[in-house]
Amino acid sequence: MGFVAKLCMFLLGYQCSFDLHTSLVTHHAKLKGVRWLLSERTDSWGWGTRKEAEAVMALQLVNDKWYRPSKPGPAATVKEMNLDLLAAISKYPKLDTQDWYGGKLGQYVNALVATCQDPSDFYGHNLIDILSGHMDGFPKYYFNHNFAYSWAVLALCNAGLTVQEKYIQQLTKTPGNYTFGVDEAAMTVIALSCVRNQTDVKSAISAGVQFILDNKKPDGSFGNEYTTGLAVQALIADDKQTRRKIKKEALLRLVEKQGQDGSYDSVAAANQIFPALNRKSYADIGSISSCQQVTTTPAPTTPPASFFTFRINVIATLAPHNVNESFTVTVPDGSSLLDAMVVLRDTDSNFTFTSKESSFGTSISSIQGIASDPDARTYWRSAVAPDTALTTSVDGFFPTAGMTVIFSLSTY
Ligand SMILES: *[C@@H]1O[C@H](CO)[C@@H](O)[C@H](O)[C@H]1NC(C)=O
Ligand SMILES: *[C@@H]1O[C@H](CO)[C@@H](O)[C@H](O)[C@H]1NC(C)=O
Ligand SMILES: *[C@@H]1O[C@H](CO)[C@@H](O)[C@H](O)[C@H]1NC(C)=O
Ligand SMILES: *[C@@H]1O[C@H](CO)[C@@H](O)[C@H](O)[C@H]1NC(C)=O
């Protein structure tokens, strides 16, 4: 029995359905992939010149809270990305070199947006103006096909700008004609899906989607893993709800291509694959939720109805510990206990925990800095108040409104 089949048996007591099976496999692939990508960083916390934006986008589209200015590792990495770009601007203020065409500048603008930075005021430089200049000069250098042009349109759209009609028309004027096949069709669909609320691009999107579907391989992929990742992103960008089976088969092919250590071929491959594994596309960069607080509309004072609140109590009274603390957490409906603990850790500096993945789900290693200890035979027991022990791991348990979950340091 494979890992996922075992996990399903453990959590649910029966073999998983195709849907659940796929979500578990892709979830696992995501976690492994992120670990691999982060481990690929060099001593300077990045991946090397002009690769930073692709890696950062991939990480933010898998977990949009990965980057926060207060987290040292991610902050160092984003700083490295910014330096990469700043170094280039200081040499070539218009970035008018081959290196920055071919979609590269578009990728960097997208990565800045993905990390809640303003591309129109990047250390005093207006990258939107520079990018628009490149678009007005199209075609030039490698910036001579719609694959690259789509990155530019996505950058403007994700930055929250109204994209000028003339820019959109470059992507709609020859529907169905893609010099670079599925890759170009997919990037075009993703970019157009970002602007579809401001102008009617339905028929160009349909032509792109049809081209992608016509090129599906018998094994469910769309070519190599780069192409397959982009194709799934395009289908997701077009419509999250439909063609589920086609997307799932392609995702399973992507999971098969992953190395034991979570690796893919390159940072560029991760950039195309990770968002798809997380049912996201590049068109979602503009709505990364951890960046949304910068809007000027006041935050609602009461949480919307699709959220619920419950309590987490932490009790460690085994000597030498003396902890008895209670936390309130509000999370979206459908959140697992693990999701809620992550939210709490991100929002309340008084709550910390660490966890690890094991073959039967996520287990708690420490809470409030107190680690379970096999030598002392201690572990973090979880229960619903007053005292009903959980029978699943924290990622498989779904709390309900008003509930109290108790973590107590216990012995066995
Ligand atoms: C397809 O696109 C290529 C490259 O942009 C162009 O040279 C060619 O004329 C186009 N073909 C049609 C039928 O539009
Ligand atoms: C586009 O319009 C749809 C339907 O009107 C809406 O649900 C969606 O949030 C809009 N997207 C953007 C990015 O404004
Ligand atoms: C923890 O504190 C609460 C109230 O602050 C109290 O009712 C409860 O008995 C305490 N639990 C332990 C194990 O000390
Ligand atoms: C953390 O605990 C301290 C001391 O109990 C309290 O003053 C502070 O408000 C707490 N912080 C948060 C974010 O709740």
Image (cartoon, grey):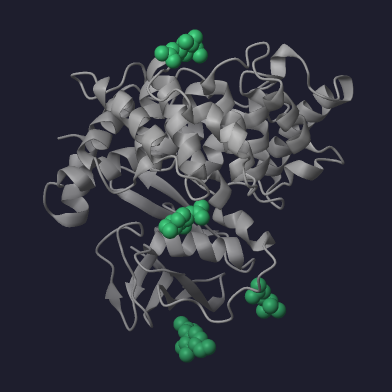
- Judge left or right: residue 328 versus residue 96: left
Q: Position of residue 223 (x, y in %)?
A: 32, 16
Q: Is residue 101 above or below residue 229?
A: above
Q: The C terminus lies in which quarter of the figure? A: bottom left
The location of residue 103, given as percent across then percent down, is: 61, 23
Camera-side residue of 63 and 147:
147
The residue that appears at 34% across and 29% down in the rendered structure is 207
Q: Nearer the viewer, residue 209 or 255?
A: 209
Q: Point out residue 290 in the picture as x, y percentages from the top left corner.
A: 59, 56
Outermost left residue: 14
Q: How many marks?
A: 0
**Residue 262 in sight from this viewpoint:** no
Please name the residue shown 29% across and 28% down the image: 210
Q: State left or right for residue 135 relative to residue 278.
A: right
229 lies left or right of 146: left
* Residue 297: % across, % down: 66, 70
The answer to whether residue 181 shows anywhere in this view is yes
Q: Nearer the viewer, residue 225 or 322?
A: 225
Q: Is residue 255 above or below residue 182?
A: below
- Location of residue 185 by image quarter: top left
In terms of depth relative to the viewer, which is nearer, 40 or 214?
A: 214
